[in-house]
Amino acid sequence: MNDPEAADLTAFDPERDPRHWSHVKNATRFRVAQVILQRNRGRDPLAVVSGWASPILATAATILLLLGAANVLIGRPDPPAASEARRLAYLTEAAVLRGHGPTGAELMAAIHPREAR
């Protein structure tokens, strides 16, 4: 726009030829409507919902990544040892065979057995 002469924009004046501009406006609206109709054609509800799969999966992966990182940073207690779970299973089996539940002392002995000295 460094040209010292003013640009002649009178050809774009809608007041000059209202019928022509009305025709241009209607033709443009018609073409836009055709494009929108063509885009929406064949897009049943299932296609619309399936289009959401990628963003939802990406969001879920990001959340899991953040939660995993938080879990690593915070830390968590070690899971009970397999031998502890095995002792509790044997105690439960024995209690079922005897017909009554284990006592508190038996439970504590299964959870924290005395170390062999």
Image: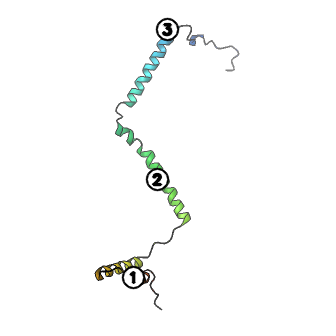
Residue at position x 57%, y 11% in the image: 11
Q: Nearer the viewer, residue 57 or 106?
A: 106
- Residue position marked by numbered label 3 in the rendering: 19
Mark 1 vs mark 3, foreground winner is 1
- Residue 95 percent location from the top left of the image: 33, 81
- Residue 46 percent location from the top left of the image: 35, 40
C-alpha distance separating marks 3 and 2: 57 Å
Residue 58 horizontal side relative to residue 41, left or right:
right
How many numbered dots are placed on residues in this image?
3
Q: Which callout, 1 or 2, points at the residue further toward the start of the chain?
A: 2
Residue 84 horizontal side relative to residue 18, left or right:
left
Q: Nearer the viewer, residue 2 or 39?
A: 39
- Residue position marked by numbered label 2 in the rendering: 61
Residue type pointed to by label 1: Thr
Residue type pointed to by label 2: Ala
- Residue position marked by numbered label 1 in the rendering: 103
Residue at position x 43%, y 45% in the image: 54
The image's mark for residue 17 is: none
Task: Categorize mark 1 by other alpha carbons within 10 Å: few (<14), some (14-19), many (20+).
Answer: few
Depicted 7 relative to depicted 90: above or below: above
Q: Which callout, 3 or 2, points at the residue further toward the start of the chain?
A: 3
Task: Categorize mark 3 by other alpha carbons within 10 Å: few (<14), some (14-19), many (20+).
Answer: few
Q: Quadrant of the N terminus?
A: top right
Q: Quadrant of residue 8?
A: top right
